[in-house]
Amino acid sequence: MSMDGCIFCRIVQGDVPAREVFRDDTAVAFLDLSPKSPGHTLVVPTTHTENLTSEPAGLALMADAVTTVARTITDRLGASGVTAQINSGAAAGQEVFHLHVHLIPRYQPGQSPRGGPDEVLTQLLGS
Ligand code: 5GP
Ligand code: ZN
């Protein structure tokens, strides 16, 4: 289900462009527009749900995608680790009210991939 006016629902539906990293039936992953590090990716359930405590529950829908994308970030971007973060509720810093997991690559000094988001996406897609 999608919700009118939700930017992440529009990305899921392909109505708003995004640098898509991964998609399956229950989740979509795309690069964050304001990355905290190169390759910062958001994973969202394809079904609209606001946050961790709202209905329908969404966390399990993203589990496989989170694992796959975290592996891709380490394998293809050379990250040494990945921070996974969910801001659930305005008080937790949530700004977009469609549940999402931030996957923020962590690099050793000097090991960040070069180039902008298009180059990073190419690397992530392995093409
Ligand atoms: P929150 O604070 O809700 O956990 O994080 C929302 C994230 O969504 C922010 O990191 C922000 O940069 C990102 N974001 C907001 N609007 C868009 C958009 O239209 N496209 C993409 N790719 N990222 C967005
Ligand atoms: Zn939505």
Image (tube, grey):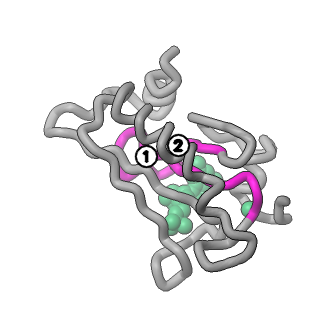
Q: Residue furthest top?
A: 127
Q: Is residue 125 on the magenta stretch? A: no
Q: Is residue 22 above or below residue 87?
A: above
Across and down, in percent, residue 80 comes to 24, 39
* Magenta region, residue range: 28-48
Ligand 2, seen in the image, is in the quarter at bottom right
- Residue at the spot x=57%, y=50% of the render? 43
SS for callout 1: loop
Q: How many marks?
A: 2
Which numbered marker is on residue 40?
1
CA gap, disc 1 and disc 2: 6 Å
To which quarter of the image does residue 99 belong? bottom right
Across and down, in percent, residue 103 comes to 43, 50
Across and down, in percent, residue 85 comes to 42, 62
Residue on which disc 2 sits: 31
- Residue at the spot x=41%, y=35% of the render? 71
